[in-house]
Image (tube, rainbow, N blue to C red):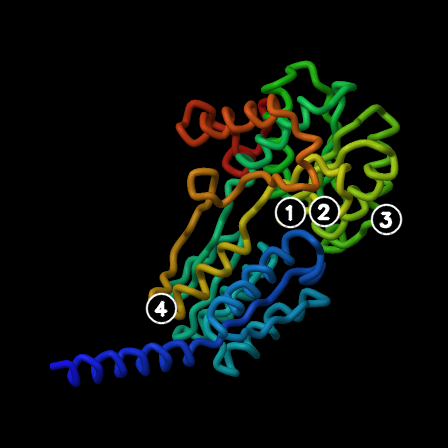
């Protein structure tokens, strides 16, 4: 009996190892690169954590232009990589085309829906997390004036801006909120000099807290805020450590979790397609607290943010979603 049990256990272990060996994950980042300190880097961190936890390596690719999206996805599929995760809404057309060509390969895309039976579409309720950092910004502001700097001017980034505005006005209905976008092309994600320029213009008008949703451009926003002695708010990844003592918090968009889960599900043979929407309830968005910003966040601020988060989770507060109704009522 013991011999049979040991044999069964060995077979299970060998089978598990074989299943794990079959997975060849890959990631295709959006413009801005995997070390943008923000959106793409969150995806990289999820892939790295999966590698550390499982010992399973992955391949990745940083596109330099739009034409490379489809090329990179097809090359990975041809080389047997599976699953392949595309980061960013701009990858949608390429994912749709390549996933149709390789129906046996599992694909994932962040921030857009691709309706195919082998594609997992991962969306986030960024407006909910942005509302929370807006609450904190309004409480931290001494001037009653705060700012927002977006990257590419698209409805997705307007969703961040509107949620932030809602949180600010929830605390201070009379607050003045400056909103500016960096541009209308992919270059808007990777222009720190322009981000700094916009931030300085808002600071000159009295903004003393500035939130960015601008990818690599936001590095310039946070730099300008720190140099001027005002507060910045990071996005996607925890950016509190970029300028300790000058970053009030960061709105966390858990792209790392989404990538990790897609890889893990594939490893376990449990990868499913369809639409996954991650908000506060699902721990898909939130705000960052660590030793770098702890001195900036008072107990009153944290209590107010947590109370707002509880109300959003319960449905008592419904944060307006710009992408479902392209207006902002706040």
| Furthest-left residue in this view | 1
State the mark number for residue 109.
Answer: none
In this rendering, the label closer to the viewer, 2 or 1:
2
Q: Is residue 59 above or below residue 211?
A: below
For numbered disc 2, what is the local secondary structure? helix
Nearer to me, 127 or 286: 286
Q: Residue at x 62, y 32 (%)?
A: 133
Residue assigned mark 1: 238
Instruction: Check whether the beta carbons of the residues at disc 2 and disc 1 lie within 8 A of each other.
Output: yes
Q: Please identify the quarter of the rendering in which residue 67 is found.
A: bottom right
Instruction: Check whether the beta carbons of the residues at disc 3 and disc 1 lie within 8 A of each other.
Output: no
Does the image show residue 234? yes
For numbered disc 3, what is the local secondary structure? helix
Q: Please identify the quarter of the rendering in which residue 131 is found.
A: top right
N-term-proximal mark, 4 vs 1: 1
Nearer to me, 77 or 168: 168
Alpha-carbon distance for marks 3 and 2? 20 Å
Residue assigned mark 3: 193
Find residue 105 and report its horizontal and vertical position in percent.
Answer: 43, 73
| Furthest-top residue in this view | 174
State the mark number for residue 268.
Answer: 4
């Amino acid at each position: 009996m013991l011999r049979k049990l040991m044999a069964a256990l060995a077979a299970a272990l060998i089978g598990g190892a074989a299943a794990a060996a079959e997975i060849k994950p890959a990631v295709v980042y959006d413009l801005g690169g995997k070390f943008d300190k923000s959106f793409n880097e969150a995806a990289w961190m999820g892939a790295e954590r999966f590698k550390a936890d499982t010992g399973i390596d992955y391949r990745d690719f940083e596109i330099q232009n739009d034409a490379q999206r489809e090329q990179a996805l097809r090359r990975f599929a041809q080389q047997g990589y599976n699953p392949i995760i595309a980061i960013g809404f701009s990858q949608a057309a390429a994912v749709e085309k390549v996933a149709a060509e390789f129906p046996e390969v599992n694909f994932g895309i962040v921030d857009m829906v691709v309706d195919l039976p082998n594609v997992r579409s991962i969306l986030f309720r960024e407006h909910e997390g942005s509302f929370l950092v807006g609450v904190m910004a309004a409480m931290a502001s001494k001037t009653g004036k705060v700012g927002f700097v977006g990257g590419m001017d698209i409805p997705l980034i307007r969703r961040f801006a509107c949620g932030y505005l809602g949180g600010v006005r929830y605390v201070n209905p009379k607050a003045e909120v400056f909103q500016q976008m960096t541009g209308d092309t992919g270059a808007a994600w990777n222009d720190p000099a322009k981000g700094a320029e916009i931030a300085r213009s808002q600071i000159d008008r009295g903004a003393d807290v500035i939130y960015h949703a601008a990818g690599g451009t936001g590095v310039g926003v946070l730099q300008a805020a720190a140099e001027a002695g005002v507060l910045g708010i990071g996005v996607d990844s925890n950016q509190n450590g970029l300028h300790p003592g000058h970053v009030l918090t960061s709105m966390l968009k858990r792209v790392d979790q989404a990538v990790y889960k897609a890889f893990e599900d594939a490893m376990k043979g449990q990868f499913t397609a369809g639409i996954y929407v991650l908000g506060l309830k699902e721990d898909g968005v939130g705000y960052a607290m660590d030793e770098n910003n702890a001195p900036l966040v008072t107990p009153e601020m944290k209590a107010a943010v947590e109370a707002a988060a509880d109300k959003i989770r319960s449905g008592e507060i419904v944060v307006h979603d710009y992408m479902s109704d392209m207006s902002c009522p706040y």
